[in-house]
Amino acid sequence: MPRCPSSPVHARECTDAAAGYDSAVPKRGSAHLLLLHGEESFLVDEEARATVQEWRRELVSDFGYDQLDPQGLSAGQLRDALLQGPFLDPYRVVVARNILPRRADSLAPAFELVPETTRAVLTVAGRLNPSSKLVKAINSAGGTVTQHTAMRPRAVQEWTVKRARALGLPPAVGAQVARMVRPDLGVIDSELRKLAAYQAGGNRLDEGAVRELVVADRQEDIFRLTDNLLPHPTPEAWRVVRQLVDREQPTLIAYRLARHLSLVLEARARQDRGEPLSAAQAEMSEHPFVVQKAYDAARQTTPEHLEGGLRALLTYEWEVKSGQIDAEWGLFNTLATF
């Protein structure tokens, strides 16, 4: 029985054909080993996330899932994880994400013998050559190696329109976003999801609304603003806010800041649970770089501080909409309370 594609978009197409197929234990020669690499990191991460989610459905305990930290990972450590037998589960899932290309070949010896009760997903933060020892080792073990190459501009536009349609957005919205946002699939996906949430809330999504909501290339400003607001506002924070206010509505700035602070709060919760950055990047839907920035910001503050900031922004939004305060003056006043 061929393995269904890992991508959520394509996996549904073969669901009926796979009905009744026992996926609990990989058959000999099946693609129970998956190596993903390439310049298009968003597609690498997306396929890895979808594959792990699919495989974890059959697990009945946490013992069956092993997330390895790629930093300092050796072939011996990876081999031990691969050879370990399942305890309560029908198989084990071993995951190592964001392996540096220069360290990939050193892991090849770990795949000399992989039991059929182990499923493994490895991602490399970059492109591997076809002559790579790790690529050859995965192929020799009966696994699958997938390279996600960088998309050309036209392909990015087509991908954006298809992703918009998959999220329930009109194709025209996808085309407009493709023109406004830099060709980064992670950024594009984030903007499309924001528009889909806006539309799902009963709001009309016309061309003007898209222009107002899409951030384009200003995400870096929110990162700078957050870095200078936490743990307490610095003089640079006010310069960043002034630059932003000169370009867009204060309420939109507050919305984007609240969205990022929510992500920082989630990152802090994961840190408190001892979860490494690589695991969060694999499980969270945002682009890995955005998650990294949230992790960096989370180390500088506390959950209570973040929750207080989110409450202040919520109060600001209500007071502006009810006409109690001026939007620009209120934004500066709200940020001063951080």
Image (cartoon, rainbow, N blue to C red):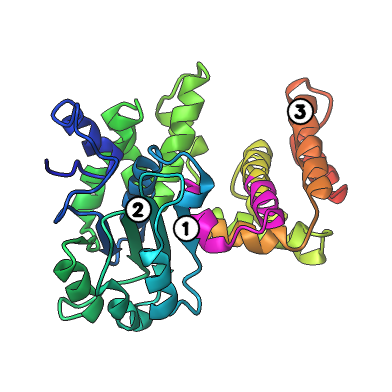
**Mark 1 residue crowding within 10 angstroms, few (<14) / some (14–19) / many (20+):** some
In which quadrant of the rendered view does residue 222 lie? bottom right
Mark pair 1, 3: CA separation: 48 Å
Dot placed on the residue nearer the N-terminal end, 1 or 2: 2
Q: Is residue 175 visible?
A: no
Label 2: which residue?
Answer: 48
In screen coordinates, is 320 left or right of 180?
Answer: right
Task: State whether residue 331 is above or below residue 207.
Answer: below
Q: Is residue 47 magenta?
A: no
Whole-percent x and y of residue 210? 44, 34
**Mark 2 residue crowding within 10 angstroms, few (<14) / some (14–19) / many (20+):** many
Q: Is residue 276 magenta?
A: yes
Of residue 191 and residue 68, the one placed in the foreground of this image is: 68
Please name the predominant secondary structure of the magenta segment in the image.
helix
Dot placed on the residue nearer the N-terminal end, 3 or 2: 2
Element type at mark 2:
helix
Numbered mark located on residue 6 in the image: none
Which amino acid, mark 1?
Asp
Which amino acid, mark 3?
Val
Front position among marks 1 and 2: 1
Whole-percent x and y of residue 87? 45, 50
Label 1: which residue?
Answer: 66
In screen coordinates, is 255 left or right of 78?
Answer: right
Element type at mark 3:
helix
In screen coordinates, is 208 left or right of 169?
Answer: right
**Residue at 18% from the left image edge and 49% from the top image edge:** 27
Task: State whether residue 261 is above or below residue 101.
Answer: above
Label 1–label 2 contact, CB within 8 A: no
Instruction: State which region is magenta.
Output: 263-286
Label 3: which residue?
Answer: 320
